[in-house]
Amino acid sequence: MPAPDRYAVIGHPIAHSRSPLIHRLFAQQCQQYMTYTAIDVTPEQLVPWVSKFFATDGRGLNVTVPHKQSLLTLPGRLSERARIAAAVNTLLRDSNGHLLGDNTDGIGLVRDLTENLRVTITAHRVLLLGAGGAARGVIAPLLELKPAQLVVANRSVERADALAAAFAGFGPIRATSFSELEGSRFDLVVNATAAGLQGDVPPVPASVLRGQGTVCYDMGYADEDTPFVRWAREHGAAGTHTGLGMLIEQAAESFYLWRGLRPNTTSVRAALGLRP
Ligand code: NDP
């Protein structure tokens, strides 16, 4: 019997990753003979490790913190969405056998928001908190849906300025500091900061919420509610969601790139404790 096709997620640290469970459920559902493991790879090991993985018949990788930007120069080819996001979260061999770097994070967020959670982005005002790698990766897919405005707010405002300048050609985007948000209202607030990892909430004024009119989405996720979700609920947001749904949707897109099959995410969302 041949060995199963090998896939993995690499990061540092990686022990907390839910990706092996998600891909195991996809593989069962789609009846695919494959393995998917989580492997701790340090920045020093990264390039030789990835080269060896593919040289020894590895079929595909997911890439997470802190390697997403480091792998931009490794693959022979980058997809348009990885180039625009300036980050790689999925590696595979293309039909010519060349290593291809792609990014499924942006489509993962947009699918979770629009298809699972039925959140409207078109013609609505969207606030994106943070200007790191995760924020950068979701700007183009959000602007594709033609919001009335996308405002990027960041602690270091010059990083928000740089993103607004880089994506000015994609749609209505502007940058601001957190304090300048006082008096502005939004329909959707997406937290793409890493503040939650330290148990913090970004210093955004509660006046950005229209109360029952605003949906708050935290790209971070944890076993319990994240600090941002708790904050949003305390201030009367209409809906509050963590990034677990985004994680599942970006995984589904990677799975599709690798296996040519699109898993149904509904049962996987339920298995990971998300509401239908
Ligand atoms: P980066 O390190 O690239 O960026 C971190 C961002 O958070 C910066 O904008 C930084 O601001 C800001 N920040 C950090 N601490 C604070 C704080 N205490 N208060 C306010 N702002 C703060 O991280 P990533 O962009 O890669 O990741 C951000 C989050 O997104 C993480 O929680 C990550 O887990 C999550 N994520 C979730 C995914 C999913 O599938 N659900 C996919 C990808 C990421 P400054 O520039 O001023 O330092």
Image (tube, rainbow, N blue to C red):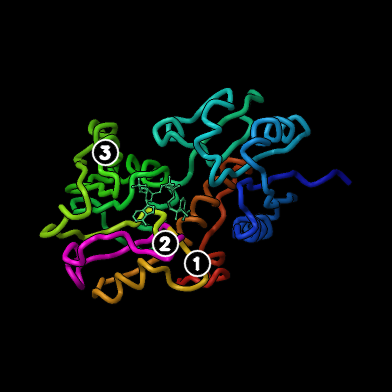
Bounds of the magenta segment: 196-219
The location of residue 250, given as percent across then percent down, is: 50, 50
The location of residue 186, given as percent across then percent down, is: 19, 59
Which residue is more in the foreground, 185 or 247? 185
Q: Which amino acid does label 3 sit on?
A: Glu
Give the mark, 3 or 1, whose residue is nearer the N terminus: 3
Q: Residue 70 carries which label?
A: none
For image coordinates 59% across by 44% down, the residue present is 62
Give the mark, 2 or 3, whose residue is nearer the N terminus: 3
Where is mark 3, residue-wise?
A: 158
- Describe the element under mark 3 as helix, strand or loop: helix
- Describe the element under mark 1 as helix, strand or loop: loop
For image coordinates 62% across by 53% down, the residue present is 14
Note whether ligand 1 is within 8 Å of mark 2: yes
Where is mark 1, residue-wise?
A: 222
- Describe the element under mark 2 as helix, strand or loop: helix
Asked where in the image residue 23 lies, by quadrant, the reply is: bottom right
Q: Is residue 210 rendered magenta in the image?
A: yes
Q: How far apart are marks 2 and 1 (CA)?
A: 9 Å
Where is mark 2, residue-wise?
A: 196
Note whether ligand 1 is within 8 Å of mark 1: no
Q: Is residue 43 above or below residue 27?
A: above
The location of residue 55, given as percent across then percent down, is: 75, 29
Q: Are marks 2 and 1 in contact (CB under 8 Å)?
A: yes
Q: What residue type is labelled 2?
A: Gly
Which residue is more in the foreground, 104 or 48? 48
Give the mark, 2 or 1, whose residue is nearer the N terminus: 2
Instruction: Classify residue 73 as left or right of residue 135.
Output: right
Q: How far apart are marks 2 and 3 (CA)?
A: 21 Å
